[in-house]
Amino acid sequence: MANVTFSSPKIKKDITVYATAGDCKTLLATARANNIPVNFECENGECGSCAVEVVVLSSRQPMGMHLTEKEKTALKLAGKISRQQIEDAELKDVPPPWRLACQYIVRDEDILVKF
Ligand code: FES
């Protein structure tokens, strides 16, 4: 089980939902299943409208890090990720702060999602 806490000026207070490990749901699917108003359009990693900030709350090595090529491209176009952050993610397992909710797979780790 992972606690996924959503925080935004668009909601009255932070909302924490429980995601079951192994569901392989995207962060966007988790948000939508819980009526949390994360922006989205294409749901396919192309428009960048679902960009969210993800903070890993556990002290373990972050798990949900893999960036798809689409995610890299959309985040670069939106100015949400640098070449260095992509390199750090790929070579040093350092997660970038911004992710696409429609591409990010929720793992068994507690995260804070700001949107
Ligand atoms: S909804 Fe378009 S990139 Fe996620």
Image (cartoon, rainbow, N blue to C red):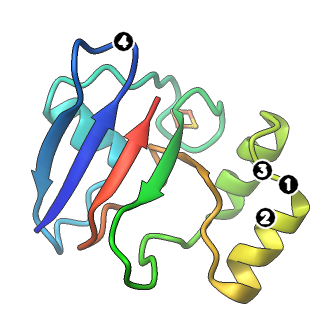
| Left or right placement of residue 81 versus residue 15 in this view | right
Q: Is the residue under label 3 in contact with that under label 1 (CB below 8 Å)? A: yes
| Left or right placement of residue 69 versus residue 68 in this view | right
Q: Position of residue 101 (x, y in %)?
A: 45, 43
What's the amino acid at mark 1?
Ser
Q: Position of residue 59 (x, y in %)?
A: 38, 78
Q: Position of residue 42 (x, y in %)?
A: 53, 30
| Left or right placement of residue 71 versus residue 50 in this view | right
Quadrant of residue 80 within the rendered picture? top right
Q: CA distance from mark 4 to mark 3?
A: 23 Å
The residue closer to the viewer here, 64 or 72, is 64
Q: Which one is earlier in the sequence, the residue at label 4 or at label 2?
A: 4
What's the amino acid at mark 2?
Gln
How many discs appear? 4
Q: CA distance from mark 4 to mark 2?
A: 28 Å
What's the amino acid at mark 4?
Lys
Q: Is the residue under label 1 in contact with that under label 2 (CB below 8 Å)? A: yes
Mark 3 residue element: loop
Indicate yes or no: mark 4 CB to ligand 1 under 8 Å: no
Q: CA distance from mark 4 to mark 1?
A: 27 Å
Q: Is the residue under label 2 in contact with that under label 3 (CB below 8 Å)? A: yes
Up the image or down, 99 lies above or below 42; here it is below
Q: Position of residue 35 (x, y in %)?
A: 17, 23
Q: Which residue is mark 1?
A: 82
List the single residue furthest toward the front. 59
- Which quadrant of the rendered structure holds the N terminus? bottom left
What's the amino acid at mark 3?
Ile
Q: On residue 85, which mark appears?
A: 2
Q: Which residue is mark 3?
A: 81
Q: Which residue is mark 4?
A: 10
